[in-house]
Image (spheres, coloured by chain):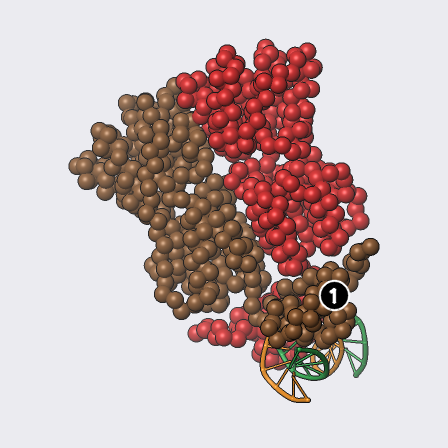
Chain colours: A red, B brown, C orange, D green
Amino acid sequence: MNTTPRSRSVTIMDVAAEAKVSKSTVSLVLKNSPLIPFETAERVRAAASRLGYVVNRRASQLRAGRSNTIAVVINDLMNPFFAEILSGIERRLVDAGYVVLMAHTNENPERQRQVLQAMREQGAAGLVLCPAYGTPSSLPEEVQQWGVPVVVMVRTLGPGGYDFAGADNEQGVFDAADHLLRGGHRRIAFLGGQAGVVLEQRLAGYRRALAAHGVPPDPALLIMANPTHPGGYEAMTRLLSEQPGIKAALCYNDIVAFGALAALGERGLRAGPDFSLIGFDNVLASALSNPPLTTVDVHPCKLGEEAAALLLERIRNPAAPQQNHVVRPNLLLRQSG
Amino acid sequence: MNTTPRSRSVTIMDVAAEAKVSKSTVSLVLKNSPLIPFETAERVRAAASRLGYVVNRRASQLRAGRSNTIAVVINDLMNPFFAEILSGIERRLVDAGYVVLMAHTNENPERQRQVLQAMREQGAAGLVLCPAYGTPSSLPEEVQQWGVPVVVMVRTLGPGGYDFAGADNEQGVFDAADHLLRGGHRRIAFLGGQAGVVLEQRLAGYRRALAAHGVPPDPALLIMANPTHPGGYEAMTRLLSEQPGIKAALCYNDIVAFGALAALGERGLRAGPDFSLIGFDNVLASALSNPPLTTVDVHPCKLGEEAAALLLERIRNPAAPQQNHVVRPNLLLRQSG
DNA sequence: CTGAAAGCGCTTACAG
DNA sequence: CTGAAAGCGCTTACAG
């Protein structure tokens, strides 16, 4: 019967008593110190497992002044793009022996401040932050002054001062627009997106492509809407009614494109033959949407892994030069455009 | 200049010195003890903020024997259903003053064991677990023996012994099938799903509905495939080639339905007029898929909140009677079926 | 090779 | 009302 009582948890002292050594010795064998001869180590390990000993990380890290906890703060879990990123981050971090403290800000800077404070108190060894819109650009520096290394993801936050992982939005949209323009399109709408750096970068790519092909930009073709399914649906609905005969659009992201696909379908239009539609991100769902979405692939999952890797490096070497990991996106031709 | 040096973090001792009181007094004002007169408390608070004091939760919780950390373990973050659940859990937990340790098992019981161990060492105050398939049904009991309260989500794990939050899968699929049968369909396929409780429950609902309408079940109409987009696509592709003239299908979940929608679209078939298709879960994306998906709504986000609430109750009262929160799902008629 | 001692930053009785 | 002391479970020099 291995019924360890639950009232009092077994400590290093109990193991020491059981193995008839001091608690220092137990501590040393648990960290595989070469100082301890095999025989003794085995005896201690046997005692530990007999007693069902579990290390108390709170205590060991308090004493050692270390932490194996990393904070990851996500702005929009409802968007699969961020869920995929989170999955990449988590995998890399757990593989490296960390445990992740996760928080969702839901695009609310106030909530973000609150969870960041909680994670600071918790003693996080680092932070990967997908900042909510409205985040002051001084935040990364502030967090670093707390003594916690940070990598910012997806959305830049003012100039420099932190490691960053994201996509080349300008180039990605340029490639997508260029593809449409080469296909002969002259009237290309841009659908969805909320005010912020990312939108600016993507619009810059859109405008640059138009300019490169000598097509004057038409403000009426810019339909702003939330970067969500309903946003995409509304944007496409408006576009179709305001611009009869329009045949091509770039979407702020895949989610917007999915909403747009629904609006198209509702009118009996099929993306591909009837209308050229391109998304951005390449979330898993875009491979088999109806129809499969042509999109700009930024490798969301890998982006997350990369951000985690950046943070791990930064923790290892706080003095290393700053890194900007900007993935060069890839236009993925499927059936919608 | 408020440049607190980073080398040594400011402790309760520093605050005590600054405010000219003992550290016990500081501790008491920080927990808003009524023992301390307003004047003194103000002085201490001022000192704390002047110094930029931040409580060290590792230390306070070690001493107090408490924990404000809750583990949440998710089996499949790539499925928006679980991302939505996670979001609901996180919101509720953070609102209650907890911080969440998140891990993704990616349906791997080995990984699950590993992260659970890490979270145990971390001293999690509770666990909400969406178990990976292959999880031994003894796991909840084992975790409870560690002294950590647990609520299991979505997939039951053997009989009783733990709080549970999930959906009435049997009834949900029954309602969906019943709807199709009342619409006159006699040949209704069931697409996708991996072996496990959830599939069994959903198939039971399917069979019960057929029986209720006197329709003999046809094993050829059961097309197993991974519960993913590609799985749904393949299942629908096979169905259409093996069963010419088929006009209705129930999908294991929304993701499978999305893949099926793509397969239908590829053949120029439109769900709704040409084929009746019903999903399960009601993830956000299903509201504006192409076409909008008729589905069984289990309120994913609320399900997550409910699970968190259950855990919070359990922590508050370990002796409370066990709870089974089974949401009665709701057939949501949209355009696909 | 192993033990005794100090201390990580806090909280909690216990005096006064 | 406030301080001195002990102790949460561990690690880390330091002796021997």
Tell me if B201 is positioned left or right of A279 in this view.
left
- Seen at 67% across and 26% down, the residue is A170
Q: Name which quarter of the figure residue B330 lies in.
A: top left
The residue furthest front is B39
Quarter that holds the N terminus of chain B: bottom right
For residue A45, above or below residue B277: below
Residue lying at the far left in this picture: please name it. Answer: B214
Residue A222 placement (x, y as % from top left): 59, 21
Residue beneath disc 1: B47
Q: Is residue B69 above or below residue A280?
A: below
The percent position of residue B205, horizontal first and vertical second, equals 27, 43
The residue lying toward the viewer, choosing from B11 and A19, is B11
- In which chain is the residue bearing label 1? B
Residue B234 visible somewhere in the drawing: no
* Residue at figure coordinates x 35%, y 49% from the top left: B327
Mark 1: amino acid: Ala
Q: Residue B216 at x, y = what percent?
A: 20, 36
